[in-house]
Image (cartoon, grey):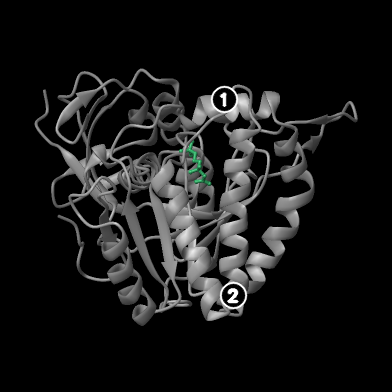
């Protein structure tokens, strides 16, 4: 057999939603019930590094996550691989004397090695960075001609939130529209219009500082897939949120971001996190992602903001108890950290590990 191996390595940060995605209208294609907006973290922290390799000597597709082999059998990996292979183009590496033709990609096998630069056990979203990085590195390896938004629609089929990690800065995931088919019926399309677009790049609002307070490193009890399914099936609040609330918030949030309007940004971010968790409570059986410490952090931030008279810090929580805190600037972030360490001293019952993002250091003990 020929001996060559061709490799590509890429790095992708995770993202945190400020207007949440919660609920799918199509589970296979992963099409959401509402638009969402997120901020992508800077690549020094919470990111995935993935190396993809192709060689005629590989006899099957294989993948390792943090050094441990995992199964690619799950439908989501297969869907992403299928989408990418079908778009692969000719690749030529004259230096190595390698020539791969479009049709060869159907029979060549891949090896994929992926690493997270943060403790995987910390209960921090990793699938977003993971699938975004997988799709991006494979697209480079196979010389895809698609742009970032078109690639995001492929990453979406791995994990919904992953589509937003293809861009830095603030990113919107557009839910995509139902299509009018020849029989004049509205029908789900192939999802190609449910994709991410960049609202502003990472330089636009660079005085924001994001701090992740790790409240618990326990694995969440209800996966987002199960949680969303149960919410879609049972929560009336979810229906109201998707139809009446989020569309207005998306417009207001885009405006707040464009204008660096921190007050409006913080108010919308906190309200949307709280509504997402209210939807979880409105689900039958109810889902509890936040715990006592999460609630204490919310009360604490609310009191601080109220005492100053205008928001200094925004909070948002995903499918777990960890707090993502967004400070309006570096000075507030420093103060916030001091206050967090005072109220939640390390080695106490409410021990917090704080990951300071947007700075060169990760602070935790
Ligand atoms: O993409 P998933 O299945 O990991 O779902 C993410 C859901 C939330 O993190 C709770 C919200 C979001 O928009 O990221």
User: Secondary structure under badge 2?
Assistant: helix
Query: Which x, y percent locates residue 120?
Result: 25, 39
What residue does disc 1 label? 28
Please identify, in this view, whether the residue under mark 1 or under mark 2 is nearer the observer: 2
Up-down relation of residue 55 to residue 44 (above or below)? above
Residue that sits furthest to the right in the current view: 184
Please name the residue shown 60% across and 34% down the image. 281
Residue 363 percent location from the top left of the image: 20, 62
The correct choice, above or below, for 24 with respect to 294 in the image is above
Label 1 sits on a secondary structure element that is loop
Q: In which quarter of the image is the N terminus?
A: top left
Residue 98 location (% of width, % of height):
19, 41
For the residue pair 112 and 306, the one nearer the viewer reads as 306
Instruction: Find residue 128 and report its image quarter.
Output: top left
At 15% from the left edge and 37% from the top edge, which residue is drawn?
5
**Marker disc for residue 263:** 2
Q: Is residue 106 left or right of residue 279?
A: left
| Mark 1 surroundings: few (<14), some (14-19) or many (≥20) residues within 10 A | few
Instruction: Check whether the beta carbons of the residues at disc 1 and disc 2 lie within 8 A of each other.
Output: no
Q: Which mark is residue 59?
A: none
- Residue 159 appears in the rendering: yes
Q: How far apart are marks 1 and 2 (CA)?
A: 38 Å
Front in this rendered view, residue 82 or 127: 127
Q: Is residue 214 toward the left or the right of residue 312 in the image?
A: left
Upstream in sequence: badge 1 or badge 2: 1
Front one among 56 and 259: 259
Count neighbours of disc 2 (C-alpha within 10 A) and say few if under 14, some if 14 to 19, many if 20 or more. some
Q: Residue at x 58, y 27 (%)?
A: 286
């Amino acid at each position: 057999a020929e001996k060559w191996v061709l490799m590509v390595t890429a790095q992708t940060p995770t993202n945190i939603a400020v207007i949440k995605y919660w609920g799918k209208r199509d589970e296979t294609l992963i099409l959401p019930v509402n638009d969402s907006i997120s901020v992508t973290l800077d690549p020094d922290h919470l990111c995935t590094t993935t190396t993809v390799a192709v060689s005629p000597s590989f006899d099957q597709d294989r993948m390792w996550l943090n050094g441990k082999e995992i199964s690619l059998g799950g439908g989501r990996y297969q869907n992403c691989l299928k989408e990418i292979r079908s778009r692969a183009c000719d690749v030529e590496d004259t230096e190595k004397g390698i020539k791969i033709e479009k049709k060869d990609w159907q029979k060549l096998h891949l090896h994929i090695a992926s690493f997270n630069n943060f403790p995987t056990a910390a209960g921090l979203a990793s699938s977003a960075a993971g699938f975004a990085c997988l799709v991006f590195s494979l697209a480079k390896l196979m010389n895809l001609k698609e742009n970032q938004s078109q690639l995001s629609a492929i990453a979406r089929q791995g994990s919904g939130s992953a589509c937003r990690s293809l861009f830095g800065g603030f990113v919107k995931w557009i839910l995509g529209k139902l299509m009018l088919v020849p029989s004049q019926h509205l029908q789900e399309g192939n999802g190609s219009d449910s994709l991410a677009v960049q609202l502003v790049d990472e330089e636009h609002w660079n005085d924001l500082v994001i701090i992740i307070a790790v409240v618990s490193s326990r694995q969440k009890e209800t996966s987002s897939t199960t949680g969303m399914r149960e919410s879609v099936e049972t929560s009336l609040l979810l229906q109201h949120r998707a139809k009446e609330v989020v569309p207005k918030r998306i417009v207001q949030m885009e405006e707040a971001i464009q204008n660096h309007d921190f007050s409006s940004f913080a108010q919308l971010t906190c309200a949307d996190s709280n509504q997402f968790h209210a939807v979880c409570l409105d689900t039958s059986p109810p889902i509890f992602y936040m715990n006592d410490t999460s609630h204490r952090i919310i009360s604490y931030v609310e009191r601080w903001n109220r005492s100053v008279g205008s928001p200094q810090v925004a909070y948002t929580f995903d499918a777990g108890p960890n707090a993502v805190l967004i400070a309006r600037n570096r000075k507030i972030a420093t103060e916030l950290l001091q206050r967090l360490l005072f109220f939640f001293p390390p080695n106490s019952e409410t021990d917090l590990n704080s990951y300071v993002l947007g700075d060169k250091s990760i602070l935790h003990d």
